[in-house]
């Protein structure tokens, strides 16, 4: 059994945003056992699993990514789309754009403290498109 | 055919640790052709595929991650759980928590020098829980 | 339905290289709906999805990775295989070695600006081996 869903997220500000509830709303009637793949169709955003409880974690993750990949590095040549653009591509390379999560007992089998995050790396990225593929039995 | 296994790793010290043998012990009777997904249910640890032969590689990987994501950065606000906690969340974002590996000829089709690693990013993380999902034919 | 393909890429220079066309040439007759997994059997190279249009993006990605993971860090002990070797293992940990992409309507469902990239992190890495696993219905 394979099911596929398309999802357009609302526009988010730059940073990491918990989107587990958006995914769960789309993925109804999960199989008993299997996997779900979540894919984001963009190159200046990413997907991440991380701590879902304390908002200070996601705020510090954002500051850590800004520190790892600063704007206006002297070696950037791809500068026409704004100071936030080239760092966004690097951050997307670091998080990746695809997550695969087990399904057990008819639910996404995330750890107690795990949530699914959008990494929005542009200042004004707009709505982002996801494809969710579920398979199992 | 989908099979799913649960695995609790023993507690490891901070660093990267080869766990291929733990995975292989659990995943018996693999299908001839397919994929295996390994998922870690934590946000301060990660999974990585890297060089399995020379222990100096995993030692240098650990030092490189400590260098990339230092403790006590002045912008951290999530500091209540210890100096190693916030860096652990960032390192987990960088490695990811989910690996997908092909199965060919009834075996995990890793390269000659590839091993599966736990990235334990806490000083005292304790035993870590994995879910392994195998499917194929 | 599960299909598996083996692919040997030509040798590439150090840097990020668009390989979408190599993948598409191998993956003919995709199922209508499903997933494709691409796996690279090496520990000093990686796979990434990123911007496929402007070559300045991949050039800046390469410079950003060189900046994130410099050669000759004083803490490296794994130095026998050349200055480019240990950084290559770290970069491979950062990008990962496995990509999972949805198949929709019989095609890899990449975003308009998304391409599949080889991250060749050695100066002279030689041809790299991939395994591509397709499943769907």
Image (cartoon, coloured by chain):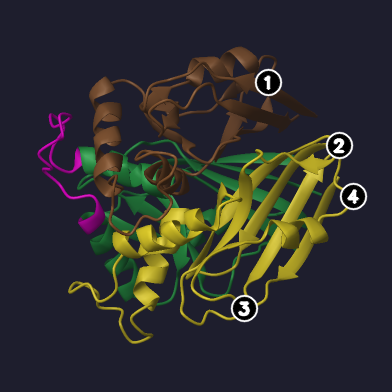
Chain colours: A yellow, B brown, C green
Q: Are marks 3 and 2 in contact (CB under 8 Å)?
A: no
Image quarter where the N terminus of chain B lies is top right
- In the image shown, does A62 or B105 lie closer to the viewer? A62
- Would you name the residue on which mark 2 appears? A32
- Would you name the residue on which mark 1 appears? B30
Q: Are marks 4 and 1 in contact (CB under 8 Å)?
A: no
Cα distance, mark 4 to mark 3?
Answer: 27 Å
Cα distance, mark 4 to mark 1?
Answer: 28 Å
Cα distance, mark 3 to mark 2?
Answer: 32 Å
User: Residue lying farthest right?
Assistant: A29
Asked which secondary structure carries label 3, the reply is loop
Q: Are marks 4 and 2 on the same chain?
A: yes
x 67%, y 14%: residue: B28
Above or below residue C86? Residue A70 is below
Is residue C69 within the magenta segment? yes
x 21%, y 58%: residue: C67
Q: Give residue A11's mark.
A: 3
Cα distance, mark 3 to mark 1?
Answer: 43 Å
Q: Are marks 3 and 1 on the same chain?
A: no
The secondary structure that most of the magenta stretch takes on is loop
Q: Earlier in the sequence, mark 3 or mark 2?
A: 3
In the image: residue A101, left or right of residue B125: right
In the image: residue C26, left or right of residue C68: right
- Would you name the residue on which mark 4 appears? A29
């Amino acid at each position: 059994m394979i099911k596929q869903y398309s999802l357009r997220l609302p526009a988010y500000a730059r940073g990491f945003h918990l989107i587990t509830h958006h995914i769960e709303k789309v993925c109804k009637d999960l199989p008993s056992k299997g996997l779900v793949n979540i894919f984001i169709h963009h190159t200046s955003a990413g997907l991440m699993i991380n701590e879902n409880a304390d908002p200070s974690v996601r705020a510090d993750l954002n500051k850590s990514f800004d520190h790892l990949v600063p704007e206006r590095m002297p070696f950037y040549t791809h500068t026409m789309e704004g100071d936030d653009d080239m760092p966004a591509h690097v951050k997307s390379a670091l998080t990746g754009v695809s997550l695969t999560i087990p399904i057990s007992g008819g639910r996404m089998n995330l750890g107690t403290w795990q949530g699914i995050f959008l990494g929005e790396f542009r200042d004004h990225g707009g709505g982002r498109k996801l494809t969710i593929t579920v398979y199992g039995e």
